[in-house]
Image (spheres, rainbow, N blue to C red):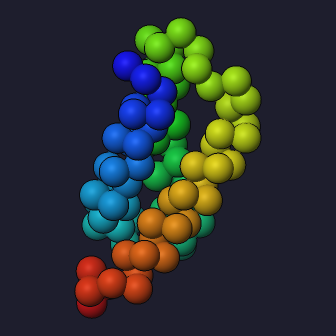
Amino acid sequence: MDFLKLFLRGVALLPSLIQGIESIYGAKTGAQKKSAALDVVSAAIKMTDAIAAKTIADGDKFASGLGLVIDGVVACLNASIWAK
């Protein structure tokens, strides 16, 4: 499968993942919740990356970018009706 399609599918799952983490870690800090989300997504991407013949060249930069995406999704959810 094309990496971009795979990546976009992963991004599409972030809102539900973040809602699940919010339910489980509601009393934790935002940084702890973000870390949990990064752990789940990173594990999924590492498994996929191993299957897809190493399409991620720099794991640290990828994880950093993924953290920014998670921050953006959280900002969108917090600005939406979901936050209420």
Q: Nearer the viewer, residue 46 or 80?
A: 80
Q: Is residue 5 above or below residue 77?
A: above
Quarter of the image with the C terminus is: bottom left
Residue furthest out toward the bottom: 84
Q: Nearer the viewer, residue 27 or 18?
A: 18
Q: Quadrant of residue 16?
A: bottom left
The residue at the point 45 percent across, 70 percent down is 74
- Answer yes or no: is residue 6 visible: yes
Instruction: Left or right? Give the position of 82 relative to 8.
Output: left
The residue at the point 42 percent across, 76 percent down is 76
Q: Is residue 2 above or below residue 44?
A: above
Q: Is residue 51 above or below residue 83?
A: above
Q: How many marks?
A: 0
Instruction: Left or right? Give the position of 40 relative to 72.
Output: left
Residue 78 x, y percent position in the rendering = 41, 82
- Answer yes or no: is residue 43 visible: no
The residue at the point 48 percent across, 52 percent down is 36
Residue 24 x, y percent position in the rendering = 31, 62
The residue at the point 45 percent across, 66 percent down is 73
Quarter of the image with the N terminus is: top left
Instruction: Left or right? Give the position of 22 relative to 3.
Output: left
